[in-house]
């Protein structure tokens, strides 16, 4: 990375987003391990779409007008 892009955001925005996402991880008690939770509005930086990278694949996450999530390749 050149210090500029992470889902199209500057490095500072990336750090703030990662911090916000880490703060939203839900902890549970008992034998069940907690699953991480991520706020879609944080992932989209308040917008309607975000790019998610897995390996070499780029996916698009979209929030619909009905408040549903669509993930496409």
Image: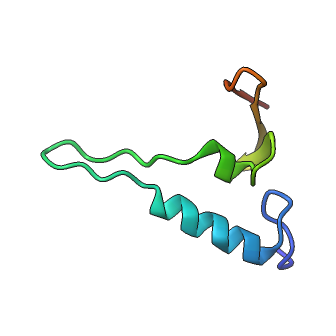
Q: Residue at 81% across / 41% down in the picture?
A: 49
Q: Residue at 30% across / 53% down in the picture?
A: 27
Furthest toward the top, the residue is: 66
Q: Residue at 13% across / 46% down in the picture?
A: 30
Q: Is residue 66 left or right of residue 39?
A: right
Q: In the rendering, at what x and y percent does residue 15 appear? A: 66, 73
In this view, the residue in front, 34 or 65, is 65
Colour setup of the view = rainbow
In the picture, the quarter occupied by the N terminus is bottom right
Q: In the rendering, at what x and y percent does residue 58 appear? A: 79, 44
Please tell me whether residue 46 is drawn above or below residue 10 in the rendered image: above
Figure quadrant of residue 35: top left
- Counting labels gives 0
Q: Is residue 19 left or right of residue 10?
A: left
Q: Residue at 78% across / 46% down in the picture?
A: 50
Please tell me whether residue 48 is drawn above or below residue 44 in the rendered image: above
Q: Is residue 21 left or right of residue 41?
A: left
Please tell me whether residue 48 is drawn above or below residue 4 in the rendered image: above
Furthest toward the left, the residue is: 30
Q: In the rendering, at what x and y percent does residue 56 appear? A: 75, 49
In the picture, the quarter occupied by the C terminus is top right
């Amino acid at each position: 990375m050149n210090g500029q892009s992470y889902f199209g955001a500057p490095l500072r925005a990336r750090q703030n987003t990662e911090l916000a996402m880490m703060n939203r991880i839900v902890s549970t008690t008992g034998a069940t391990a907690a699953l991480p939770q991520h706020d879609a509005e944080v992932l989209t930086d308040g917008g309607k779409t975000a790019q998610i990278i897995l390996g070499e694949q780029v996916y698009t996450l979209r929030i619909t007008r009905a408040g549903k999530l669509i993930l496409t390749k």
